Amino acid sequence: MRILITGAAGFLGSHLTDRFLSEGHQVIGLDNFITGNRDNIAHLAGNPSFALMEQDVSTYISVSEPLDFVLHFASPASPSKTSPLGYPNLPIQTMKAGALGTHNSLGLAKKHNAKFLLASTSEVYGDPLVHPQTEDYWGNCDPVGVRSVYDEAKRFAEALTMAYHNFHSVDTRIVRIFNTFGPRMRLDDGRSVPNFIQQALRKEPLTIYGTGEQTRSFCYVDDLIEGIHRLMDSDEHMPVNIGNPLEVSINDFARLINEICENPAGLNVNASERLGDDPERRQPDITRAKTILGWHPVVSIREGLSKTIEYFKSKLGQQKA
């Protein structure tokens, strides 16, 4: 197949690119590098099966070659207020990626009669009143809150994807991605995994936003990529949750990172205020993924963190050098 991936230099986009190339497909990667990282695709230089389009997804996309699949992964995704990569600091770009970017990507798929997959998010559920979250839950979102630029962009993107499916008969997929971690996360991303690991490696207390009792469900990137791959091969058009249903508190997650890094400094709880509209609980119901895709995560959080920590050690070592 020839596959176009928007956000191909991002954390998830680059892993997908490698997966498809390893299977013998051709990949066109589109990225404007606002949050994408050139290092993530540097190893693909000279690969005849990979072509890079350096372009903003919110502008018209023109591809002359036939396409079999379009995957739309381009968007800022970090809720961090302190990182320049966080969507609170890139609000217009985030909305444009979700609205115009989805429109352009769907238009490209329609033109080439290609299949389409939207990378949506668990954030469409907002601060959920239903737990765990099933795909038929409509969510509890503040449309004008701090996180709204991301939440509502993704909710709009899902609605537009279904409109193209129902009105234009585009063969679409929607994956709702829950918290994912692994190698190629940016060190300056601002989210909990990069922040915690770097502090732990420096033997510093881990900074906890709020009480740390808020929960998340962390999925290792290899498991997520496998779930997305199976969704692409399926005939499912409705949204599918992909994530790890093991729910852990932020405090417990931070303690595990300290344990693996042998960091005795502990936690600095209530050191910083939480971002407004920060969900109190997050846990996917993956019944649909298990039933339709035969998918469930197989990498433990400890194993995934060990691999991720080794990656961060390497990157930090390169910075010092």
Image (spheres, grey):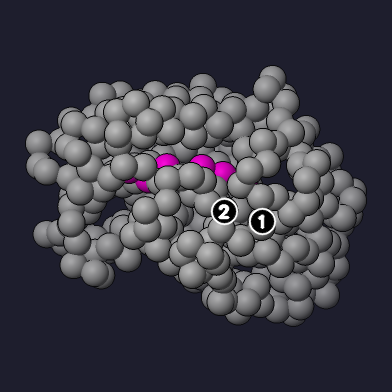
Kindly state the secondary structure of the residue where label 1 is placed: loop
Image quadrant where one finds the N terminus = bottom left
- Contact between labelled residues 2 and 1, with CB atoms less than 8 Å apart: yes
Does 279 sit above or below residue 288?
above
Q: Label 1, label 2: how many angstroms apart (C-alpha)?
A: 6 Å
Front residue (pair 242, 300): 242
Image vertical order of residue 214 relative to residue 299, above or below:
above
Q: At x 78% / y 51%, what residue is drawn?
A: 131
In the rendered view, does 108 fall on the left or right side of 140? left
Q: In which quarter of the image is residue 287?
A: bottom right
Q: Which amino acid does label 1 sit on?
A: Pro
Residue 207 appears left or right of 108: right
Residue 241's mark?
Answer: 2
Task: Decide if residue 292 is in sight here.
Answer: yes
Q: Position of residue 151 (x, y in %)?
A: 61, 33
Which residue occupies the foreground of this view, 117 or 186?
A: 117
Q: What residue type is labelled 2?
A: Asn
Residue 106 is inside the magenta segment: no
Question: Is the magenta region chiefly helix, strand or loop?
Answer: strand
Residue under the point 41% across and 33% down: 161
Mark 1 crowdedness (10 Å alpha carbons): few <14, some 14-19, many ≥20: many
Indicate which disc, 1 or 2, sits on the residue closer to the N terminus: 2
**Residue with the mark numbered 1:** 284
Q: What stretch is highlighted in magenta?
A: 116-123
Q: In which quarter of the image is residue 137?
A: top right
Q: Is mark 2 on a helix, strand or loop?
A: strand
Please name whichever residue, 4 or 267, is drawn nearer the observer in this view of the structure.
4
Q: Residue at x 25, y 37 (%)?
A: 109
